[in-house]
Image (cartoon, rainbow, N blue to C red):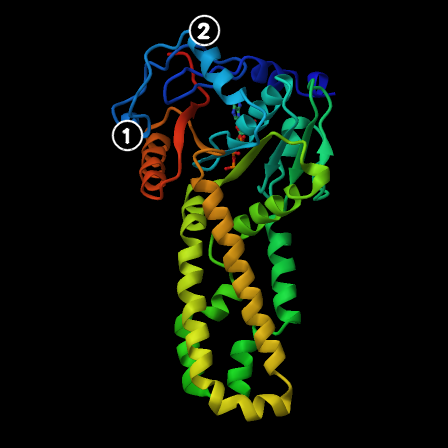
Amino acid sequence: MLATASPGLHAAARRLTLPSQARCVVRLPRRRPGRPAWLPAAASAAAPEAAPPAKEGAEELGFQEMTSGTRRRYYMLGGKGGVGKTSCAASLAVRFANNGHPTLVVSTDPAHSLSDSFAQDLSGGTLVQVEGPDAPLFALEINPEKAREEFRAANQKNGGTGVKDFMDSMGLGVLVEQLGELKLGELLDTPPPGLDEAIAISKVMQFLEAQEYSMFSRIVFDTAPTGHTLRLLSLPDFLDASIGKILKLRSKIASATSAIKSVFGQEVQQQDAANKLEQLRERMVKVRELFRDTESTEFIIVTIPTVMAISESSRLHSSLQKESVPVRRLIVNQVLPP
Ligand SMILES: Nc1ncnc2c1ncn2[C@@H]1O[C@H](COP(=O)(O)OP(=O)(O)OP(=O)(O)O)[C@@H](O)[C@H]1O
């Protein structure tokens, strides 16, 4: 089905080329092969070891490096909005599968572009097998909004926003103000950018721990645009700080309110909310660790040959370096003839 429904994509995946240096160029249909002559100086920050004109042999060697070994590896594709992250993630996943890797490609894009790339409906929130490649290729489209809703519903059920409401109801107005400063309500009601995606990624990681999904040796993530990725990386610190302050505050008021709390039976609810936040923080820490694990993970920046995209990619690369996220390759998409 893939070959007939998306012949261009399939062909592109087969022609995916990767130089052995720190960058790779994906050539999609109707695009001119070869090193882009337009690459301005600004790109050197995103690809410090800018490659010489790529030779097919060297490119294949680079790709072999990505396909070698059966140990599970994660590839995170990120970059500016609309540069072709989903298209490239789909191409890379097909290429992995055609090289014998049981592969899973995950998208957290609510626009469902992965479904369009494969011409299959993947929106059900479960794994769907993509027809065409040699080895099993499964795709999963996670709706981050839905994942967030689940999280919020769980919090509400467990009295999550109730921490603030509870303080209010106890007449502890001053502390409510302090809580406002801690942005607890904001965190639970309007999560910071990146949280949706972090929840989605941690969900995927959770189910990959199950025996039935242990076959996947390559996991490709089509991640959100730049800003979200950066927020996602700083989330555990943000949550650490927030949760730390919340717990400190809680212990401060514990003695003053314990009698009233037990009368109203809200102590358990509060504890649940704190546990839920703590669980969330732990999951975020796992996501952060995954991003930084040079053994298993690689972040690939996708860009296009425009000044704005390259500038943003350059900033993304610097930020990822600062966060110790391994970046070794750059995909330059939509290379046009001069
Ligand atoms: N090499 C290419 N040649 C032709 N069209 C392309 C190419 N790469 C991407 N496109 C088209 O550009 C559009 C955006 O691509 P895609 O959805 O993959 O980008 P994205 O970075 O994932 O977007 P978003 O940030 O919105 O998630 C799509 O219509 C896609 O078909």
Amino acid at pointer 1? Ala
Which SS class for mark 2? helix
Task: Classify residue 317 as left or right of residue 266.
Answer: left
Number of other residues with Cα within 10 Å of mark 1, as a class: few under 14, some 14 to 19, many 20 or more: some
Q: Is residue 143 above or below residue 334?
A: below
Task: Classify residue 1 as left or right of residue 8.
Answer: right
For residue 106, what is the image quadrant? top right
Q: Which mark is residue 45?
A: 1
Q: For the C terminus, give its image quadrant.
A: top left
Q: Which mark is residue 57?
A: 2
Q: Residue at x 65, y 16 (%)?
A: 7
Q: Which mark is residue 150?
A: none
Q: For the N terminus, give its image quadrant.
A: top right
Residue 70 at x, y percent in the picture: 59, 25
Which SS class for mark 1? helix
Ligand 1 within 8 Å of disc 1? The answer is: no
For residue 328, what is the image quadrant? top left
Residue nearer the viewer, 97 or 251: 251
Residue 275 at x, y percent in the picture: 57, 68
Q: Residue at x 61, y 33 (%)?
A: 105
Please report contact status of discs 2 and 1: CB closer than 8 Å, yes or no: no
Q: Nearer the viewer, mark 2 or mark 1?
A: 2
Choose the circle earlier in sequence order: 2 or 1: 1
Disc tally is 2
Q: Residue at x 36, y 27 (%)?
A: 306
Q: Is residue 96 visible?
A: yes
